[in-house]
Amino acid sequence: MKGLTSKISKTLTTGTMMTCSDNSGAKVVYVIGAMRYKGTRSKYPKVGIGDIVIASVKKGKPDMVKKVVKALIIRQKKEFRRANGMRVCFEDNAAILINDDYLPVGTEIKGVVAREIAERFPKVAAISAGVV
């Protein structure tokens, strides 16, 4: 997996509810854990754009609700800084569902994704509406 070229401010934590921006059947996901997080004991894990989380589906199709899934964060409200000095922020926090091979479950992504996602996960960028 390729490294990120930006300094992502990690502001999402466990307990965050965010919209699911793909057509997999989930509408709202609830973050219950972070994958590949190395942190201090008794601190909440923090995640940002490009991180993979363990999430529970709260709203969506009846067969998807209460399922524990892996999700990739594609947008965050808090601004982050790119290497060229530009700061980028989005209107909402959003994630998409992925499988164990880090491939998207849905076939279409509503809205745009960050350029950092396109560099690290090219299959996600291929099905997105646009890259910012």
Image: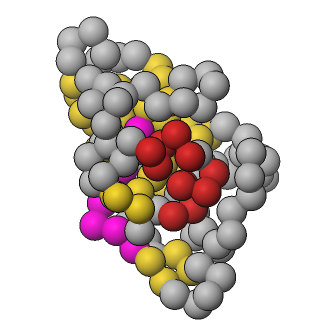
How many tags in the picture?
Answer: 0
Instruction: Specify the farthest residue to the front.
Output: 126
Res 123 seen here: yes
Q: Which colour scheme appears in the figure? A: secondary structure
Residue that appears at 58% across and 46% down: 121
In front here: 125 or 51?
125
The picture places residue 56, in percent across and down from the top left corner, at: 41, 26
Q: Is 35 situated left or right of 15 in this image?
A: right
Residue that appears at 59% across and 90% down: 85
| Majority secondary structure of magenta residues | loop
The picture places residue 86, in percent across and down from the top left corner, at: 52, 87
Magenta part of the chain: 89-96
Q: Is 48 in the magenta?
A: no
Rendered view: 54 above or below 118: above
In front here: 72 or 117?
117
Q: Is 41 situated left or right of 53 in this image?
A: right
Instruction: Specify the farthest residue to the bottom.
Output: 85
Rendered view: 3 above or below 121: below
The picture places residue 117, in percent across and down from the top left corner, at: 54, 55
Q: Is 93 in the magenta?
A: yes
Residue that appears at 57% across and 62% down: 116
Q: Is 79 situated left or right of 121 in this image?
A: left
